[in-house]
Structures are given as structure tokens and as C-alpha cells.
Image: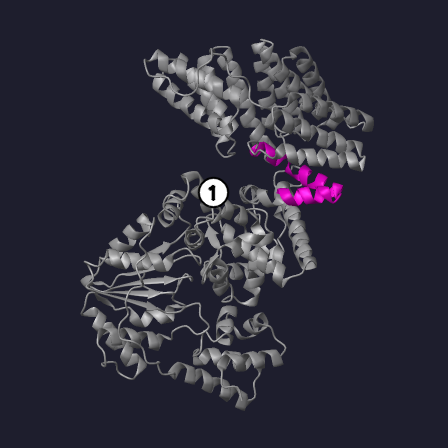
Amino acid sequence: MDDDLGALLRRHRQDADLTIEDLAAASGVSDRGIGDIERGVSRGPQHRTVEALADALRLRPDDRAALLRLARDGRRRPAAPVPHALPLPRRVPDFTGRAQERAGLGRVLRGGGPDAPAPVAVVTGPPGFGKTTLAAQVARDLRDDFPERLFLDLRGVDHEPVTPDAAVRRVAEALASGTVPPDPDAASAHVRGLLTDRRVLLVLDNAASEEQVRPLVPADGPSAVLVTSRRALAGLDGVQHRAVLGRLAPGDSVGLLDAILPGRGSAEDLARLARLCDDVPLALRIAGNRLAARAGWSIDGLVRRMAADERRLDALAAGDLRVRAAFTSSYEQLGPGAQRLFRRLALVDAPTTGAGLAAALVGESVWRTEDLLDELVDLSLVQHLPGDRYGLHDLLRLYARSELEHQEDAAAHDAARAAADDWLLRTTVRAGYRFEPDHAHEGSAVPGELDVDLPDQEAAQAWLRAESASWLPALRRAAAAGAHARVAEVADALHWFSDLWATWDRWAEVFDLSADAATALGDDRLIAVHEGYRAWAQSICRGDLVRARAAADRALAAARRCGDTTQEGWALSYRSWIASQSGDLAHAERDAAAAVDCMLAAGDHEGAPQAMLSLAKARQRLGRLDEAAATVRATITRVADPRTRPRAQVAPFTEANAHVYLASILVEAERWEEARAVASEALRLAAPLGVPRIVATAHLARGRAHAALGNTDAAVLDIEIAVAARRELGIDAPLAAAVAALAEVRAAVGAPATGPGAPDRAPDRAPQPAAAG
């Protein structure tokens, strides 16, 4: 007969042909709870938990009784004899960094008193991040505040952590030897009473669960409890401060290495080594110790050994200190589902991921995957980041990759990546459709279990931005595999959205891939569409007017071959913009006028106003300001008319863009009152769109109008906003114009000019046109 609860439960589960996940679903007991029982971490689970498991397993009466007896015996297991003293660990002479965490913990732990709750602070973080070392250092920092400082290792990552009753007895023996009552509840009350009457700092290191800690927390009094754990211990009540440890600051990492290796390397050499250690304290200490123990080794030599990802974890070993072992002790605490998810997160191209992509990697529902991610976060193997994102530190990513290679074969890797890529590209299309006039309704479809919810444009835009570092590599792989139709579909879904995020530096690559895919498919209409996208990206995102013009010419030729008047209009509109930028203003006006004719003939409500704005820009640059203003006003009228208004978000974007065009023309015409009013309206219209280029240009136009009208304070404020926005956009010529305007206004009021050199004042030109269809 089995005399171990975990072994007996595992045998019954296997006899029933159930996985841990199956048993969890049938019993209502969590994966983690079942895993803890089977591994011996939880040796005395509650009666109702065992009853639920027995019911789910449909055990016979005698098997049920045996399972319940072993659980009851586990709860009653007597504590082993323990030493009375609980001293702090050996001092670390080269402790470095963590000043903010030390100050915060010290401030909270000192705050106890006779009429106040006993302070409780919890330090959590991934394995190897220095939780124990920090806790011991804080205890030493507080030696004048706490005459007694006790340190108890609860062995939270061992197969058999210290039981709650054993922990109570060890602390009680350290405080008052020989006074502990035999009953567990009485012993807990006794130790809390001892802590209430004395000023004791109790450091509970490496806690496995809340139940280890609760019996040792006094209700009030001057004592304080400092807990460290890889788990979040979210169920622990009364915690007044939680410190979540991240990596060391780069300067502190270099300082720690320098303390271990005084005089062995330059700051630059130590910084290179620190980066390969991912600024993780355990890794830094191991690397430093390896070099300290080998006088003949150079830092460069160790850096070369660690530079190869597949060798780095094995290189981070010194004696019995091993980074891999620290990670393994946490990994083994996970249930099978969480282990598989952790391994496959190594396949993610980006530093962070959302729950949807994680679900696609393991083929689970999003809600189920969120539970698995919570398990990983709870053990500090994965970080939960703002925006509901999840990230792996670099060394943990290497560990996940090594486990993936050892636990799953190459075919499984390829299948998981293929499923994730398929999900990424499908979701990119779903999100992009939110901005596409022809498909906007498709983005509102009810998502399936593997899909994320994208209820509106805001959610779709947030997803596209957040997952761009994952869906773009998936698009590259699709292009490399010859999935040309898929590549074109994804790019087509994104082209109107690209206007709202024109500052992203990867659009040129996206539309290069799609234009090449269209050419490979040999479809003239697709070639016209995607060469047009390429022309937009090359001119707007890269400023490469030569490549942009070549792409626009190819688009025009393809549109005329297939007789598509709409695409002919778009190609002509692109050519007009590019010619205007090149200074070929006669051709710019001619192409724009032809583009307007094509769009009106085709009845394209989205394209017509873009072509009209290109025509206005050409006329502005030709100095025919009244004609340019009239063309923009006609554009605004067309956009406002329900019969000709563009669909979806194209209408508000075009309306805001047109007002910016008009404000720029009015500034050049020195019609200051009108310019100020129109620029203010442009800002109002642009506010919900979040397009920094429009906002920057509108602020600049209004600032110039304010300056001409004598409102210098308002002028400086507006133009400062424009300069800041254009500096972030990184577009040289418009930034120089904004800086020059700011210098001129400040000079007029005797204020010092700032920023880069101020060129001669020149009117800011009209903003870039919308990305076209």
C-alpha cells in the first residue's frame, strides 16, 4: 500500500487515465494544488479538497478512506527537532544597489507599535534576483530598531517545504525554548503572543505559500515580519509593502562586478559582462566568482564564452552556484500546462507578448492561458507588465529555449510557431479591418476561444502596436515561404491604419513585402495597389523620393493595364505628392488634377479628397494661395456632405488633415485671424485621432498666427509643443522650420533661443497626405 499521499493520488489519477488538467477540471481543484500534492509540496491538504479529488476520481470507499487518512496524517505530522537559534545568513561584504528597496522596506518595518498592526512586507522576484540577500541586508540595516532578528528558511522550492506547524515551533523555540504547546493551534497562538510582547524582526525566507506565513504574523505590537518568496503570495492579508525585484540598474551591476574583481577590468569591459548576465545578481556574482577564482582568465575570454546564447547558462556556473539550477527549482514547481507554455514563450520574437499569442502557442483558450500565465507570474518566471503584457527576462528566455529543445522535438516547435504565425496574421487582418471602409464591420465579429476581443478601433490600434514586433516577423516568414496572397491580404488590411501610425519605422518593409508579393502573383490590380503603398512608404517613412517615384510609376502602369480608374487616381495622387516634394511643381499640379478626375469618375469617396489635397498642395507651392485655399475648402465641404463623405475613420482623419492644410496656406497668406481659428479647429478634430504630425503642424500654424497677432506667450507655448512633437517624429526639415519659428518669436520678446541652429524663417509646408488606398 502507498504510504505517501502524492504517490497515491498520482497512481489513482493515472489509473483513471486523467491528466492533471483533466482532474482539475473535474474536481474544481487547481492544477497547481494537484501538482503540489503529487510532488509532496502539500502533504496535508484540507479535507474538502481531498473529498473533491476522490469524487472526481470515483474512488471506492476503501481507496477514498486511505486518501483521506494520509491527508489527515500529513496535517498532524510532528515537527522534527530543530535548533533554537535562527541567525541571519552570512553577511555579503560586496552588497551593491537596491537603495530604493532598502529604504522602502526599512521605513515600513520600523512602523510598528503597541496600537498599530504589526508591519508585514513581502519581497518577490524571479530566481536569482537577490531576494534573500536583500532581506538579510535590510535586517542588518535595522539592527538598532530590532534587538532580536530571526531568519527562517521556509524552503519554498524544495520538494518538502517546511510545514506551517514546524515553522511555528522553530520560531517559538528560538524565542522561548521549551514553552511550545503540543497542539498546533495553541502553538501558533503562543508564538504570536511572544512576538506581540517583544520587538522582533522575523525574516521568513523563501516562502512556498501563504499558509506557512499566516501563523507567524502577530495581530499588533512592535514586531515586524519580512517575507521573501518567488510566489506573489497574493492571498496574504495585511501586507503593507510589496517590493518586486527587477534586474539591477546597469551602474549597480558594474559596481558589483568591480567589488568582486577590483582592478581586473575597465568600466566598459565590466559593462559588457554585466549585459550578458542580464543584470541578474546571481549571474553577476557567478561570473565574478569564476573570474576571481582564475587569475589567468580575462574578462574578454569569459565574454566570448558567454556570447553564444546556447552556452551562456552553462557558463554561469561557479562551484555549487548555478543559474540554471536556480531556474530549474522554480520551473519544477509548475504544472505541466504552465511548463509547456513557459517553454514555448521562447518562440515569441518580441520581448513581450499578450495572452492571445500565448494561447496560440499552446492551442488553449485565452481564458485558460491567462490562468497559466498567472501561474508563471506567481512564481516570478514571467513578468506581468502594463497593458496586460507578459515578458521574460533574457536569461529566463534562454532557459525556456533550452527546456523547449530538450522537452519537445523540432516538429513540435515548427507546429507551434506555424500556429502562432497563422493566429498573428489572422488577428492582424481582423484588427486592420477596423480601419478599412470595405471591411470595418468584419472586425466586430464575435471572437472564438483562441481570439482576442477587438471591440473597437481603440482596442484594434492598441493590439496592432503592441504586437507589431511579433506580427511583422510572422509576415516576413510568410513572404519567405511564398505565401504571397497572405502577405498582400495583411498589408491591404493595414494601409488605412498606417496613416494613424505613420511614425512607425517598419511600414516601408511591410509594403515592400506586399508589393513584391503582388508582382509574384502577376495580378495587375494588386500590383497597382501595393506599388502605391510602397510609394507612400518610401516617400513618407523613408524620404526616398527616387524609389517612391519608381513605385508610383509601376502602380500607374499596372492600373492602366487593368483599366482600374480608382487605382490610376491613387497612383497619380502619389506621383503628385512626390513631384511636389521634388520641386517639380508643374507635373505635381498636372498629376493631381488628373487624379481628382479619376477619383470623381470612379466615385471613390475615400480617394477624391486625398487627390484634392494633393492638388491644393501643388497650387500652394506654386504660390497660388487663393486657389489652394479654395481647393481645400471644397475638400472640407465634400468630406462634410453625407453624400460624398468618406467611410469609417477616413472621414475624421481627412477632415483634420484638410484643416491643417488650410491653416498652413492661411499662415503663408498672412491671414492671421483665419489661420488661428482654422488651426484651433484642426486641433479639436485631431484630438481623438492621436496623429502627432497633424497635431504638431496645427500647433505651429496657430503659434505663428498668435505671434503675428501679438500674443507672444500663446505663440511660444504652441510652437514649443510643435518643436517637441516634431523632435519625436524625427523629420529634419519640418523640425528645422519649427525651431526657426520658435527662435524668431523668442527673439522678438528678448527670450533666449534654444534647440538646434535656427535657419532663415520659411513657411511650414503642408503636411503629408493621407496614406492611400
Q: Tell me, yes or no, if residue 707 can be seen here.
A: no
SS type, badge 1: helix
Quarter of the image that includes the C terminus: top right
Q: Is residue 157 above or below residue 757?
A: below
Residue 541 in the image, given as x and y percentages of width and height: 60, 28
Residue furthest out toward the top: 623
Q: How is the model colour-coded?
A: one colour
Residue at (81%, 35%) from the top-left corner?
522
In the rendered structure, the answer to whether residue 525 lies left or right of residue 770 reads right
In the rendered structure, the answer to whether residue 212 lies left or right of residue 424 reads left
Quarter of the image that includes the N terminus: bottom right
In the rendered structure, the answer to whether residue 753 lies left or right of residue 641 reads left
Q: Is residue 125 above or below residue 645?
A: below
Q: Nearer the viewer, residue 355 or 675?
A: 355
Residue 491 image-quadrant placement: top right
Q: Nearer the viewer, residue 3 or 186?
A: 3
Residue 114 image-quadrant placement: bottom left
Residue 596 in the image, given as x and y percentages of width and height: 69, 20
Q: Is 481 covered by the magenta stretch? A: yes
The residue beneath circle 1 is 272
Q: Nearer the viewer, residue 313 or 262?
A: 262
Q: Is residue 681 above or below residue 165?
A: above
Q: Tell me, yes or no, if residue 563 can be seen here.
A: yes
Please state which amino acid type lies under the numbered disc 1. Arg
Residue at (46%, 85%) from the top-left corner?
70
Type of secondary structure dominating the magenta stretch: helix
Q: Which residues are magenta?
A: 472-501
